[in-house]
Amino acid sequence: MATTKKTTKAETYERLMAKTRLGRRIERLGWRRLARIYQAGGTKVRLAIRNEARRCGYTPSTILALHAE
């Protein structure tokens, strides 16, 4: 019996900032998912998530500390 391994795409800055008909991906993801991406992401990804938190009126350290796993 063959099993398939689910592959996940690495979140890149371009992928987070991509516009679709539903809006930018970074705007649609929840804070818990963004916190996981923040921990694994590079400098540009981290900066984009911090800016998104500020845009929503939150301090980045508070949001990321609440949702870190």
Image: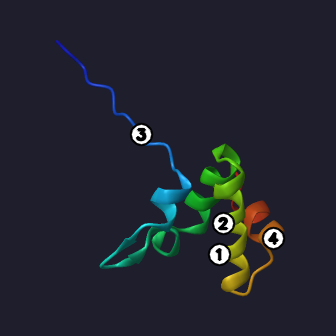
Give the distance between the C-alpha atoms of the residues marked 2 and 1, in whole angstroms: 5 Å
Question: Could you tell which of marks 1 and 3 lies nearer the N-terminus?
Answer: 3
Question: Could you tell which of marks 2 and 4 lies nearer the N-terminus?
Answer: 2
Where residue 48 sits: x, y (%)?
A: 65, 66
Where residue 4 sits: x, y (%)?
A: 26, 24
Q: Quadrant of residue 30?
A: bottom right
Secondary structure found at label 4:
helix
Q: Quadrant of residue 53?
A: bottom right
Relative to 17, does residue 2 appear above or below in the rendering? above
Crowd rating for badge 3 (residues with CA inside 10 Å; few <14, some 14–19, many 20+): few
User: Mark 4 or mark 1: which is in front?
Assistant: 1
Secondary structure found at label 3:
loop
Give the distance between the C-alpha atoms of the residues marked 2 and 4, in whole angstroms: 13 Å
Identify the residue shown where x is 50% and y is 62%.
16
Identify the residue shown where x is 78% and y is 70%.
60
Identify the residue shown where x is 34% and y is 33%.
6
Q: Which residue is mark 1?
A: 52
Q: Which residue is mark 4?
A: 62
> What's under tag 3, amino acid-wise?
Thr
Q: Which residue is mark 2?
A: 49
User: Mark 2 or mark 4: which is in front?
Assistant: 2
> What's under tag 2, amino acid-wise?
Ile
> What's under tag 1, amino acid-wise?
Glu
- Compared across the picture, whether 5 is left or right of 47 comes to left
Frontmost residue, 17 versus 49:
17
Crowd rating for badge 1 (residues with CA inside 10 Å; few <14, some 14–19, many 20+): some
Relative to 11, does residue 7 appear above or below in the rendering? above
Q: Which residue is mark 3?
A: 8
Q: Are marks 2 and 4 in contact (CB under 8 Å)?
A: no
Q: Are marks 2 and 1 in contact (CB under 8 Å)?
A: yes
Secondary structure found at label 2:
helix
Question: Could you tell which of marks 4 and 3 lies nearer the N-terminus?
Answer: 3
